[in-house]
Each structure stands twice: as structure tokens, then as C-alpha cells.
Amino acid sequence: MATLTKESELGKVTITKESDLFKAIKEEQDTIEIEGDLAKKVVRIKVIGKVAWAVALGAMGLIIALFLVLTVSGAAAPSIGLVMVIGALALLVPAAVTLGGGPAFASAILIALAGGEIGVLNSLRKYKITEQSKTKCALVRK
């Protein structure tokens, strides 16, 4: 079980951080309650359409790959890093716009970076929003 903010009942967790959201999705929690600013960001991520989602995932994939290449190899692969930076920048603005702005896009990247994989964002699509307010949302696995 992930170390999450609170655990109120079996299969239900309450979280406030991107890294905890990653853990809850990977553990296939039945119900995830998200509180604070992260709740608004997750709602923005969840409401985008399939085409916009594909654009956003492509850009995030490049950015995460760039991050991993540069942190693992250091200066060993400068030409690969340059190509990836150019590609990521070309997709960065449209991807951020499709996710409803920079904060939601940044949270999506942080969620994926928490575990070093972008697939968790596809898993997020397996949840539906059942409750929503300004400071809280609840996701239930479909």
C-alpha cells in the first residue's frame, strides 16, 4: 500500500500530491479522493478529448524522455538531447493548452515522473469523476 495522506476505508484513499496520485493509480485503488489545488488540475486533465489527449501525451513523452536521457547520461548524448529539446518545445505549448493551461500540464508531467512512466496517465483515464467541488474531487475506477 502506498504511503498516502489518509486512508479512510478499504480501497479508498485521500491524496494531495502528484506522487501519491501515481501510487494510488498504480495500486488500482477503487476510489481516490483528491484534495487541494491538485483536484482542479486533475479535473482539467480528465476532461480533455481523445485527440487533445494524444497531442498532450506525445509532448509529455518527449519531455519525460528528455528528462531521463539528460539525467541518466549527463552530457554523453548532447545531440540526442538537442533534438529532443526542439521536439518537446514544438509540442509543449499546444500540449499545455490542450490540458487547460500550464499548471495542469505540469501536474501531468509530475504524475508521470513520479514513477518514470507516462502510462499512468492512460490509467488515469480508467477513472471517472464522481464528485467535484472547488477544493476536492473523487475518482472511481470504471
Image: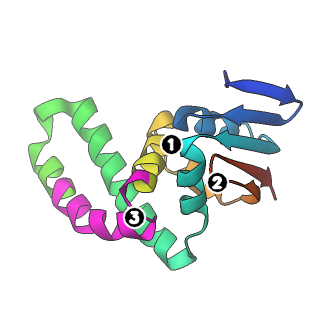
Q: Do the residues labelled 1 and 3 touch (CB within 8 Å)?
A: no
The residue at which mark 3 appears reads as: 58
Q: Which residue is drawn at 39% across and 64% down?
A: 58
Tell me residue 92's x, y (percent).
Answer: 29, 62
Query: Quarter-wise, where is residue 5 in the image?
Result: top right
**Mark 2 nearby-residue class (10 Å; few <14, some 14–19, many ≥20):** many
Q: Which of marks 1 and 3 is in front?
A: 1
Marks 1 and 2, the one that precedes in the sequence: 1
Q: Are marks 1 and 2 in contact (CB under 8 Å)?
A: yes
Q: Which residue is drawn at 83% across and 44% down?
A: 30
Disc 1/disc 3 C-alpha distance (Å): 15 Å
Q: Which residue is drawn at 63% across and 34% down?
A: 23
The residue at which mark 2 appears reads as: 124
Tell me residue 38's x, y (percent).
Answer: 55, 44
The residue at which mark 1 appears reads as: 111
Task: Please identify the dominant SS of the magenta region.
Answer: helix
Query: What amino acid type should be assigned to the residue bearing mark 1?
Result: Ile
Query: What amino acid type should be assigned to the residue bearing mark 3?
Result: Gly
Disc 1/disc 2 C-alpha distance (Å): 10 Å
Marks 2 and 3, the one that precedes in the sequence: 3
Q: Which residue is drawn at 75% across and 49% down?
A: 138
Tell me residue 29's x, y (percent).
Answer: 78, 40
Where disc 2 sits, the SS reads helix
Tell me residue 107's x, y (percent).
Answer: 46, 47
Query: Quarter-wise, where is residue 36 in the image?
Result: top right
Give the residues in magenta: 85-103
Image vertical order of residue 16 relative to residue 92, above or below: above
Magenta span includes 2: no
Magenta span includes 95: yes
